[in-house]
Amino acid sequence: MKILALDIGGTAIKSAIADESGEITELQENATNAKNGGPYVMERAMEIAACYSDFDAIGISTTGQVDPKTGSITYANENVPNYTGTPVKQLFEEKFHRPVFVGNDVNCAAVGETHYGAGRSFSDLLCLTYGTGVGGAIIIGREIYGGSLGLAGEFGHIVTHPDGRQCACGQHGCYEQYASTTALVRECRKVDPALINGRLIFDEWHRGNAAIRMIVDDWIDEIVFGLVTLVHIFNPSALILGGGILAEPYIENEINSRLFKRVMKSYANFTVVRAQLKNTAGLLGASWLTLHSGELEQAKA
């Protein structure tokens, strides 16, 4: 069975054909132009999907909170204006007349890593991605745990600084305001406005810039503060950490070193691993979830 998989992000829309073994073909990546708004993004995603043929169902990984029953966007921030409320599943089913599954992008990435990537050896794990914000997903018994409304895993909105920075969610001091790559860039630009991304920051770090090194060390502590809380709540067998900047060996080593010093010894029987699938995690997760969705099982019957 072939699944047309789409991964709709704020920067790019990735697409491919995936099969039951996890093999991906016809991989494409197109700009989202998300600032044009939700209706434009939907139109663009359907144009991309229309370029494919010979598929049995559609699996969509998307930014934003997703209602698992209706496949609609429950909430999306201003990275994609006017995306909240978009009936993604309905729109795609009306156009393509195939079964459609829609899931949150971090949940889909976590499922992809669980079944095809870094999480294959673990049954209970947490997946976090550090980028514009901090995304999270919970895997229990090798399946996504969504909570009562399918929205569980918003780790970026754990409050780590009660009197801290204003967050777009309306709270103050959310984890992602301190531990995201956006937060790191914000602090580094106070030293040098030209440091607009992680690559430039670590170029300076490798040059021995003392101020930047201090900011990076403080930022790693912020990452670890949130992870300590999550380890003590969930007692996972693994943490899968993603986000391009975490590929820096110094960050990976320091997170491991500091985290295991801070958790209680009785909770320390877990592994920290880097996400393996990179740009294909969401596609593979969306494909797997589509293949195992109740609706597709009914269609096959």
Image (tube, rainbow, N blue to C red):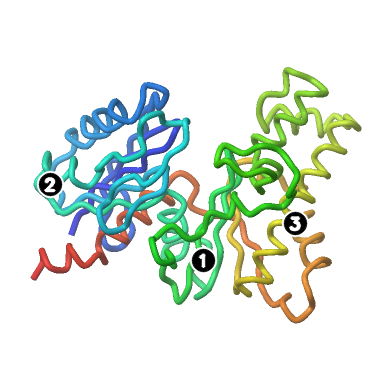
The secondary structure type at the circle numbered 3 is: helix
Nearest the viewer among 90 and 113 is 90
Give the quarter of the figure containing the C terminus: bottom left
How far apart in space, not on screen, are marks 3 and 1 (Cα)? 23 Å
In the image, residue 35 above or below residue 236: above
Residue at image point 79% right, 75% down: 264
Residue type at mark 2?
A: Asp
| Spatial separation of the CA atoms under disc 2 and disc 3 | 47 Å
- Residue at 36% x, 38% y: name it: 84
Q: Secondary structure at mark 2?
A: loop
Q: Which residue is mark 1?
A: 119
- Residue 30 spot, x, y in % from top left: 36, 29
Say which of marks 2 and 3 sits in front: 3
Q: Position of residue 254 (x, y in %)?
A: 79, 54
- Give neighbour class at mark 2: few <14, some 14-19, many 20+ (Cα, 10 Å): few
Which structural element holds mark 1? loop
Question: Foreground mark, 3 or 1?
Answer: 3
* Marker disc for residue 225: 3
Quadrant of the image containing the N terminus: bottom left
Which amino acid, by three-letter code, is at mark 1? Gly
Q: Which residue is mark 2?
A: 54
> Real-space Cα distance between discs 1 and 2?
30 Å
Is 194 rendered above or below residue 88? above
N-term-proximal mark, 1 vs 2 = 2
Amino acid carrying mark 3 in the image = Phe
Confirm or deny contact between disc 1 and disc 2 (CB under 8 A).
Answer: no
